[in-house]
Amino acid sequence: MYARVASFEQSDMSRVDELLATVSARAAAGQDMPDALRVLMLTDRSAGRMLGITFFETEEAIREAEPAFERMGQEIPEDLRGRRSSVEVYEAAIDDTAAGAQAARVSVLEGASDSIDEGIRFIQQHIVPAASDISGWRGIIGLVDRANGRSLTITLWDSDESLVASETWADQARSEAAAAMAESITAVNRYEVALDRVLAPTT
């Protein structure tokens, strides 16, 4: 499975709920991207930023969906959706999530691409089992760009309170994962899970 990650910047977040309603309605209709598997939208209202993460079975499916994304960008005005600052494609190496997530922590790591598989194994064997016992845990998504040695680790929580309470554990787990992947931590951001809609079952 692969993920298209689009970053948006919005100085005026007063219309974010209107945007979310629009995206949710379009996703439910299934007309824009019939091959999409899941849509996840993360918002940071205080910082004026959003991440739109759309999952597909293959990279080819993402390429074929690009005209639909461009059409949506034309149909949803920039003053509503914000300015798109980047679009990146990742392999979804880890997808272990449950329903009910309300908050997310996104850690960005960069480094040696040849250590990514070792890092994935470390997360699956050590971090995920330990996290399962933490109150409020709703799962993890691990996105990797093998060509550039870049990865996004998204941990999901049932509330902002649970996310905040997990900070000490998260700092240690993130450092351990970075060491296992021979990567450096370049950013850690916290978001509201504004939309999480499964569009089609994964194979």
Image (cartoon, rainbow, N blue to C red):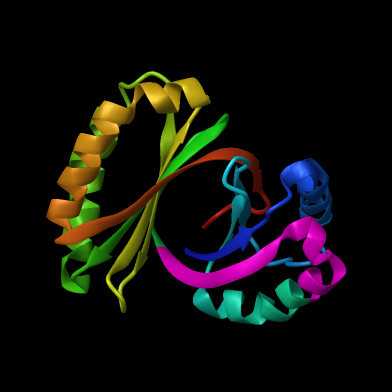
Above/below status of 115 relative to 129:
below
Above/below status of 102 relative to 77:
above
> On the rendered structure, is 148 left or right of 77?
left
**Taking the image as drawn, is residue 3 in sight?**
yes
Residue at x-position 22% and y-position 72%: 113
> On the rendered structure, is 74 left or right of 165?
right
Residue numbers of the magenta segment: 71-91
Percent coordinates x, y for residue 41 in the rendering: 62, 49
Q: Is residue 148 magenta?
A: no
Picture quadrant of residue 31: bottom right
Percent coordinates x, y for residue 126 in the rendering: 18, 38
> On the rendered structure, is 103 left or right of 179?
right
Residue at x-position 58% and y-position 65%: 6
Residue at x-position 51% and y-position 76%: 59
**Taking the image as drawn, is residue 56 in sight?**
no
Above/below status of 72 relative to 152:
below
Residue at x-position 80% and y-position 60%: 79
Percent coordinates x, y for residue 186 in the rendering: 30, 57
In front of the other: 100 or 184: 184
